Amino acid sequence: MENNKLDLISDLSFEILTHIISFLPLKEAVRSTSSLSTLWRQLLAPQTVHLEFETSNFQQVLGKFLSSYISPERWKLSFLAGETEEDCSAKEDVGVVVMATKGVEKELHLHFLEKSGKKKTTSHGFVLKLQQSVVSLESVQSRSSFSSLKTLHLRSVNRQVVSLVSDLFACFRRLENLKLEKCEGLEDLNVEGCDSLQSLEILDCEDFVSITVCAPNLESFSYRGALPRMRLESTSDLVDADLDLRIGVGGNEFDCEDVLCLLASLKEVQILTISGWLLES
């Protein structure tokens, strides 16, 4: 008799189902909808948008995507990205796909991928500079969809899109949480002028040589990977620091002075967790 019970929830309209999942944290919403029926999976099925690479076009599309945080949503953006004439002449090698996922708590996840079927190119080292630029009030109002964002998760940023990511970051006026994950080829990271930033998490970016962070209101900092040169400046409000250095120095050279400078910058931290290599004799 139980087999004849009606699935009343799945009979609800698409709009009502979307409203229901808007009450879940984004991570739970994605996991729940992916494990349920086809109808539920369609709620966060990515919409595909094809673009020819121009930074201004990408910002317009992403701005439209972020215009409302009523419910979780996913877009699949496909575009061409090339920084040099040589790159642009080989368009089949520079196709990029971005899985963009937003949550109701004003959060955005950008996962950069190479187009399926394309041979993975050799990664070259690159520098990523993330800075909130000083812009006019009129400019801020015209980019209100960006300025209200609070959480940004960047995954697999590569050399082809590094300028695009830097330009976008300048628009995020109220960003509180930043996470970078698995950015192959990223050697130098410079985060500065980010007064709103409270939490920074850097995970599994294997090629790091140097990290510089200047964020006066930073409260939490987490890092997992090989030990790079790391400088935390103007971070007097830092409360919690977690360094997972079990990989060791990786391909970097150990510099005792750099390590002492890092530890000195953490001396006022209330909670300091260091895992692995630094604690070994």
Image (cartoon, grey):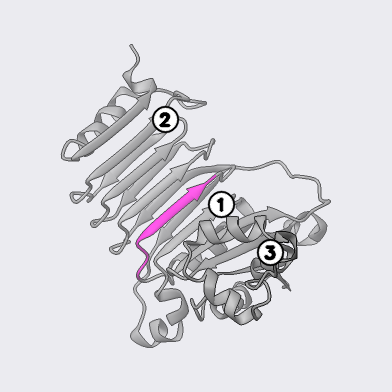
Q: Name the residue under label 1.
A: 155
Query: In the picture, which quadrant includes the C terminus?
Result: top left
Q: Which of marks 3 and 2 is nearer the N terminus?
A: 3
Q: Which residue, as the protein is rendered here, is positioned at the far left?
A: 268
Please, what is the dominant secondary structure of the magenta stretch?
strand
Query: Foreground mark, 3 or 2?
Result: 3
Q: What residue type is labelled 3?
A: Arg
Vertically, is 101 above or below 114? below
Q: Name the residue under label 2.
A: 227
Question: Element at badge 3?
Answer: helix
Query: In the picture, which quadrant includes the N terminus?
Result: bottom right
Q: Name the residue under label 3.
A: 41
**Rendered location of residue 170, percent (x, y):** 43, 68
Query: Foreground mark, 3 or 1?
Result: 3
- Work out whether residue 239 or residue 263 is closer to the camera in this orientation and state it: 239
Q: Earlier in the sequence, mark 2 or mark 1?
A: 1
